[in-house]
Image: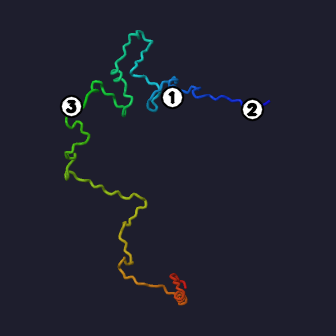
Amino acid sequence: LFSLEKEIFPTPTPGTYVVRDFIEEAQLNPVKATYNFKGEGRKRPSIFQPTADLTLPDVYAYIPPSFVDLAGKKPATYSFKSAPRKSPSTLCFKDKDIDTAPGQYDLFPVPVPTFKEGPGPGEYEMKEKAPHPISSCFQSKVPRLQPIRSKIPGPGAYEPTRQFPKQPQTIASLGHEHSIFFSNTFGF
């Protein structure tokens, strides 16, 4: 009735399944990969491939403009602060070809001392502004920050003396017998 043989299910051997590598996966993708900066978009018209309007007559006789013409018409795609594109006539200039006079290319002011503009010392008079009066409804007639005269002598005007508070005899004897010293016994 029962057979002792187990039914063996065959497992696939290596190479049975087609495993594509990343190059084959990229070739299956219908969208061509583009590499741009973030937010640039996927499709941009290339300046190398001019697009012609096929609805116009004589399109077959269209002569595309040169690369230099197209580059001069289009703004630079990636530059600092949208710097304008250099003109093709000065594009190949080297530093040795540019003739500049001394001082035309200095970025900092000349280290020669120069006089400041305006009148010299003693050629003008300063106008002193009158102090603004206090415009408060609580305006006081008492002069402010006057020296305070008190009858208490200042520091160093007297000799300090040591004074101890008087304690009753019973408390003083307790302190001597039991080594207890009371310092604030004014009410006894």
Decide if residue 132 is on the left or right side of residue 187.
left
- Choose the circle earlier in sequence order: 2 or 1: 2
Residue at figure coordinates x 22%, y 31% from the top left = 96
Report helix, strand or loop for mark 2: loop
Q: Amino acid at mark 2?
A: Leu
Residue lying furthest right: 1
**Which numbered mark, 2 or 3, is in the foreground of this view?**
2
Q: Residue 134: percent from the left, percent from the top?
A: 38, 59
The front one of 173 and 63 is: 63
**What is the spatial separation of the Cα atoms under label 1 and label 3, in whole angstroms?**
55 Å
Residue at left offset 19%, top offset 36%: 102
Does the residue at mark 2 contact the one at mark 3 (Cβ under 8 Å)?
Answer: no
Residue 182: x and y, percent?
52, 83
Q: Which residue is mark 3?
A: 99
Ranked by sequence position, the earlier of labels 1 and 3 is 1
Q: Secondary structure at mark 3?
A: loop
Question: Residue drawn at (38%, 65%), measured in percent from left and top?
Answer: 141
- Number of numbered discs visible in the structure rendering: 3
Which mark is on residue 7? none
Please rate how many residues cluster around mark 3, counting C-alpha atoms within 10 Å: few if below 14, some from 14 to 19, many from 20: few
Pick the residue in front: 147 or 39.
39
Q: Nearer the viewer, mark 2 or mark 1?
A: 2
Q: Which residue is mark 2?
A: 4
In the picture, the quarter occupied by the C terminus is bottom right
Relative height, residue 124 to residue 173 (above, below): above
Mark 2: few, some, or many residues within 10 Å (few <14, many ≥20)? few
Left or right side of 94 for 159 = right
Image x and y of residue 187, in percent: 54, 83
Q: Is residue 162 left or right of residue 21?
A: left
Q: Which residue is mark 1?
A: 22
